[in-house]
Amino acid sequence: MSLLDLAKTRLQTMRESELESLMIKVYSFCGKHDIMIPKMDENYPRSKLIDLQLHELNKRFDVVTSDVLLGMACLNPVDSFANFDKDRIMKLTNYYPSEFDDNKLRDLSFQLDNFLVYARMCDNKFVNLKGIKDLAIVMAKTKLD
């Protein structure tokens, strides 16, 4: 997600202030390699390609998708769940209102607190897991799923 944010920021910066220098480099490259340069008059929107790329990134990685990906990343067991973020995981419940009433939200909050302590301190099966697949396997074996 950090790389996605970086890509969006760089594209926006390029669109706003670096497009001319990029075009100069493109013209130079094309000239050196005898590549025909299409005529781009003043009416041609040079930033159209960047706008299309930004639109595509925003379409594919909307707020919901980003929240889900970040929520899943919080469950990464590497380094004793160093990326664990209860608030971000709880935020995912907003997308499933029919599944989580007040009681279930309270239970989930309590369960997440307990899980983190258990996984870090009580059961060595959770040590040295390499990814979410390993986590799922151990949770099923220990009946914590």
Image (cartoon, grey):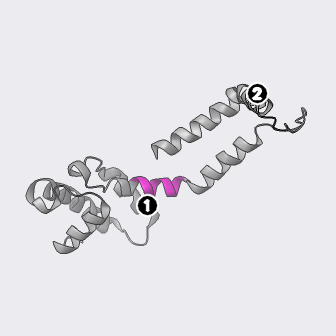
Mark 2 secondary-structure assignment:
helix
Give the residue drawn at x 30%, y 55%. 76
Q: Earlier in the sequence, mark 1 or mark 2?
A: 2
Q: Is residue 68 a member of the stretch shown in magenta?
A: yes
**C-alpha span from label 1 to label 2:** 52 Å
- Hey, what amino acid is under mark 1? Asn
Region in magenta: 63-70
Q: Which residue is mark 1?
A: 94
Q: Quadrant of the C terminus?
A: bottom left
State if disc 2 and disc 1 touch (CB < 8 Å): no
Q: Is residue 98 a member of the stretch shown in magenta?
A: no
- Front-most of 116 and 7? 7
- Hey, what amino acid is under mark 2? Ser
Image location of residue 23, percent across then percent down: 75, 30
Image location of residue 133, percent across then percent down: 30, 65
- Front-most of 81 and 115? 81
Mark 1 secondary-structure assignment:
helix
- Decide: is 80 above or below 30: below
- Decide: is 141 above or below 52: below
Q: Give the quarter of the image for residue 8.
A: top right
